[in-house]
Amino acid sequence: MAICQFFLQGRCRFGDRCWNEHPGARGAGGGRQQPQQQPSGNNRRGWNTTSQRYSNVIQPSSFSKSTPWGGSRDQEKPYFSSFDSGASTNRKEGFGLSENPFASLSPDEQKDEKKLLEGIVKDMEVWESSGQWMFSVYSPVKKKPNISGFTDISPEELRLEYHNFLTSNNLQSYLNSVQRLINQWRNRVNELKSLNISTKLSDVKDGVNQAAPAFGFGSSQAATFMSPGFPVNNSSSDNAQNFSFKTNSGFAAASSGSPAGFGSSPAFGAAASTSSGISTSAPAFGFGKPEVTSAASFSFKSPAASSFGSPGFSGLPASLATGPVRAPVAPAFGGGSSVAGFGSPGSHSHTAFSKPSSDTFGNSSISTSLSASSSIIATDNVLFTPRDKLTVEELEQFQSKKFTLGKIPLKPPPLELLNV
Amino acid sequence: MSLFGTTSGFGTSGTSMFGSATTDNHNPMKDIEVTSSPDDSIGCLSFSPPTLPGNFLIAGSWANDVRCWEVQDSGQTIPKAQQMHTGPVLDVCWSDDGSKVFTASCDKTAKMWDLSSNQAIQIAQFWDTRSSNPMMVLQLPERCYCADVIYPMAVVATAERGLIVYQLENQPSEFRRIESPLKHQHRCVAIFKDKQNKPTGFALGSIEGRVAIHYINPPNPAKDNFTFKCHRSNGTNTSAPQDIYAVNGIAFHPVHGTLATVGSDGRFSFWDKDARTKLKTSEQLDQPISACCFNHNGNIFAYASSYDWSKGHEFYNPQKKNYIFLRNAAEELKPRNKK
């Protein structure tokens, strides 16, 4: 490795994170690195130690010969500037990161979050403009859980669906579903793009959960808020064709009946998916009515609503949820419920939020649980259905632990059923 | 004479009858085309292991078939055999002794194809081939998107950015769950070995034109693990929004330890992960490259040019021919000397 010239002069900004060699500092730096490598669930600083791989713009370029990667590093800049500046305060302490991990936490914390938001916004912009595969989960920092509102569908899964529908002569449904997926994705991306500091906490933390469902209802297309997914595991392929989604609502499917592994749509599904123990994104490819207008043109460009995917960020930055593999819904829900103020079968709580149009939700003030609940309560005749207006079946659905496919109520739950 | 029936052979050399058309870009690298390539998108490629003399290539496709060719040193490819599934074949691999091929398909079956007897029997899950019951069932938290095995290590990348490493000695068990180094959906994974030929880490590709190199037990994780961008349209031009393509496959050269990536942009690239440099990028093919594979001694690099559904059904043209190309990989993948 190259010897770091800056270190030799006593002024290396990266300390033990530097990619070049610091003669004589190896042992000291190496030892202190260790604690930082823990799963960064509790240690926000944990990002920074690994952020070096992203903060490559600032690196004194010993990799100058490797231009392609060097070049790419420049482009990394916008994404990861958050880490750079967040970490910069530490860098001044020399090998510092591990020396005072929790020292100036608050101002840094805010700055970091701000940078994180910027990172998210930037990522969204790139995602949209680059033409990359849109049915993918996303996480702004590599160690974090996925942001909700995105579902993971691999190209093969999508293609398999296409083939299945083709053989069953039901191509139109496929097209509709795909269109809806795209719309939902697009909406979600737009929502994330308009994040700013005030909405950030809610959105990224738990509000993300709520924002997600908002689309289900608020979507102007009145599309069924589907949770597309493909019956990969167990056998829901049979069920796939039988889902009937009511047109206006959004309680997308696949929550309870879903085979292990696919909780359904984000917020709602969350409750259901705990049972399957897996993060979101329902498997069943629901195709509601072809009332969605532009069905035929599956262009990866049209706008719309999205949202499914694991309730991501429960509590950024302080408590990074456990690894994405589990993305246990529980923590997200723990978060979710606190914000919503309507705990447990979280699915209920989200409906409450989703009633008002997606716009108000996307941009506004779900900033704290308090404000949220107060705003909700203010308009509660819109958000909740009085008990007497519900049919017996709907009431039963709300009261049960999870929604049954095909019976998900269109109206929001009554206030009394929500645990505050 | 074509063994596979309907498709007509295109000749073994790169200069097929289309070669003269200036607009035709199906083989800009002038690599050897495999005869009788499958009729639909190729999902997976696999070369025979060193225990089998000669080189045999297996390809599984969305036309529900698995085809086997013998690849001779002259570059000639001879179709040898074919097996059918009732659904698209997503992955294939060879047994260590080279006598059997395992194929997995969307029809929810996995089959073991005995090449000598040309019989395929159905198996599934984690198999000890001597018994007819699963030896072990490993529950995954999410859908498996890609996996790789080099004994005694296996890596599985799942949906929702999940990543699990298994150790396969004695009773296979989960070794570690790793937080994904990538921000988007995982697409492909390949294990690499260290100088002592032991698996020591893996490369993980995502849909976002990025590959992460991750060591299992690195001395210095922050420095040793890294990611790099690939399969993007503009190099360093940051002003125009670049097109980002998925990395469809990663393969490590068995001898040099350098890696090849193939992407939806229709290019393949060779990289040296130790020197952290790019060795070569190909010209752009007119179709995405959906799979790639090295043969056992690293002399041949095979890549499949077929539609990977990266742009949805609109761009799917069933009439478009799918190709498998073979390239001499002995020279181009030599590692760059570190300074």
Image (cartoon, helix red, strand yellow):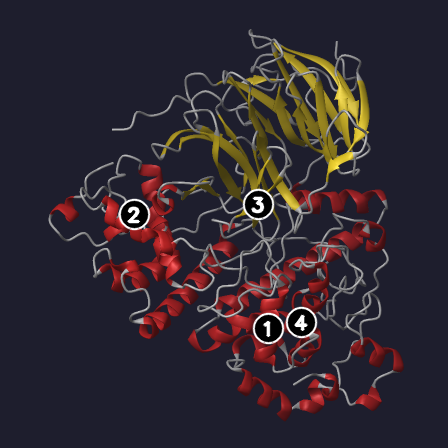
Disc 3 crowd rating (10 Å Cα; few below 14, some 14-19, many 20+) is many
Marks 3 and 1 on same chain: no
Residue at image mark 2: A30
Question: Label 3 vs label 1: CA separation?
Answer: 25 Å
Question: Label 4 vs label 3: CA separation?
Answer: 37 Å
Mark closer to the observer (2, 3): 2
Question: Label 1 vs label 4: CA separation?
Answer: 27 Å
- Taking the image as shown, residue A88 lies to the left or right of residue B272, namely left
Height in image: A48 above or below B227? below
Residue type indicated by callout 4: Ser
| Mark with earlier residue (1, 4) | 4
Give the residue displayed 80% in from the left and 23% down from the top: B120
Could you say which disc has been placed on residue B164 in the image?
A: 3
Question: Label 2 vs label 4: CA separation?
Answer: 52 Å
Residue at image mark 4: A219
Residue at image mark 1: A334
- Chain bearing tag 4 is A
In the image, residue A74 lies at what x, y percent? 33, 49
Disc 2 crowd rating (10 Å Cα; few below 14, some 14-19, many 20+) is few
